[in-house]
Image: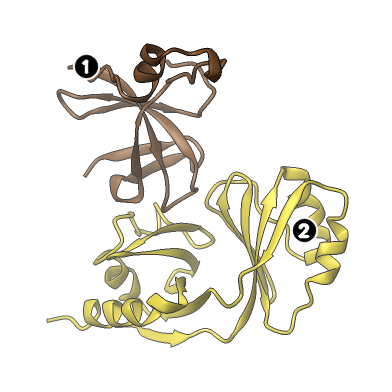
Chain colours: A brown, B yellow
């Protein structure tokens, strides 16, 4: 089981308390009405799915209830860092 | 070995707001909601449990009156909801309680990692609970009313030994 450091609880917490919530740092088109289909498709469906480090959102649903951002290596499944939403990716 | 008892009915209030809400609520409620993560403050029969950075569970005797607290928070952006009937509490007492909880809770419940005075939401088997360690061998387990039978049976089975 992964141990995920929760920046709000300030401790390592077991993966079973979290829900995965997809890739982090996706920006909704600033003017939704003006965005064309390609822009919407990018926002809604197209994901980087890298082999290596990815920034993901996780929600500590059975804990503080907050969404957090986590850097995870998809090859080793190692958690590299976690940080609060709105903070810069380390 | 440990005993499972049902806690007496209590008033449960879910308080959400900024730190100044916690400070003002503390003055009116009698217990200051902790700002430190995963902590619980207790004074007499009242307690305030940290659940999230802007979220606290306030516990008080069942005849407690929340109107004074609501009045004290007037003018501040906050949410104060009575959730008394949503959950009930199991009281675990005994040295084996931590071991039985560990059968379904993935947290480290050793006193060094989960000292008395610590409280947090977590999981027990297939359900979510709020776990509060009141003493070295005393636990307060908040569990949704509809899932209390599951929690009780789970803990009894886990504590049965073999």
| Rendered position, A5 above or below B67 | above
SS class, disc 2: helix
| Rendered position, B39 above or below B146 | above
Disc marking residue B130: none
Say whether residue B58 is left or right of residue A80: right
Whether tag 2 and tag 1 are in contact, CB under 8 A, the answer is no
**Residue for badge 2:** B26
Q: In which quarter of the image is the C terminus of chain B?
A: bottom left
| Rendered position, B61 above or below A78 | below
Q: Where is residue B110 in the image (x, y as percent from the top left)?
A: 35, 58
Q: Position of residue B122 (x, y in %)?
A: 40, 57
Q: Which residue is drawn at 48% across and 13% down?
A: A35
Q: Where is residue B99 in the image (x, y as percent from the top left)?
A: 28, 69
Judge depth for marks 2 and 1 and give the one in front: 1
Please name whichever residue, B50 or B147, is drawn nearer the observer in this view of the structure: B147
Q: Quadrant of the N terminus of chain B?
A: bottom left
| Rendered position, B125 above or below A78 | below
Q: Residue at x 87, y 55 (%)?
A: B74
Q: Which residue is drawn at 78% across and 66% down?
A: B30
Q: How far apart are marks 2 and 1 (CA)?
A: 48 Å
Q: Do labels 2 and 1 share a chain?
A: no
Q: How crowded is mark 1: few (under 14 residues within 10 Å), some or many (20 or more)?
A: few
Q: Residue at x 57, y 15 (%)?
A: A31
Q: Where is residue B45 in the image (x, y as percent from the top left)?
A: 67, 77
**Residue for badge 1:** A50
Dot 1: chain letter: A
Please name whichever residue, B116 or A37, is drawn nearer the observer in this view of the structure: A37
For the image shown, how many numbered marks are present on the structure? 2
Dot 2: chain letter: B
Say whether residue A84 is left or right of residue A1: right
Please name whichever residue, A7 or B88, is drawn nearer the observer in this view of the structure: B88
Say whether residue B31 is left or right of residue A18: right
């Amino acid at each position: 089981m992964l141990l995920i450091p929760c920046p709000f609880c300030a401790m390592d917490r077991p993966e079973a308390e979290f829900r995965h919530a997809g890739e982090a740092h996706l920006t909704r088109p600033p003017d939704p009405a003006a965005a064309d289909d390609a822009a919407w498709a990018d926002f809604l469906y197209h994901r980087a799915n890298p082999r290596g480090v990815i920034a993901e959102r996780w929600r500590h649903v059975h804990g503080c209830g907050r969404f957090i951002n986590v850097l995870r290596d998809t090859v080793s499944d190692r958690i590299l860092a976690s940080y609060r939403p709105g903070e810069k990716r380390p | 070995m440990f005993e499972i008892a049902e806690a007496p009915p209590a008033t449960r209030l879910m308080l959400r707001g900024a730190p100044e809400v916690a400070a003002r609520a503390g003055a009116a409620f009698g217990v200051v909601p902790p700002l430190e993560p995963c902590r619980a403050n207790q004074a007499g029969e009242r307690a305030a449990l940290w659940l999230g950075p802007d979220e606290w569970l306030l516990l008080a005797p069942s005849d407690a009156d929340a109107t004074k607290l609501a009045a004290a928070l007037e003018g501040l952006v906050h949410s104060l909801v009575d959730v008394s009937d949503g959950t009930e509490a199991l009281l675990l007492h005994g040295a084996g309680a931590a071991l039985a909880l560990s059968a379904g809770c993935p947290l480290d419940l050793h006193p060094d990692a989960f000292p008395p005075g610590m409280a947090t939401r977590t999981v027990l088997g297939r359900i979510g609970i709020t776990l509060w360690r009141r003493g070295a061998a005393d636990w307060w387990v908040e569990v949704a009313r509809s899932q209390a039978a599951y929690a009780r049976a789970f803990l009894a089975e886990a504590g049965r030994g073999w």
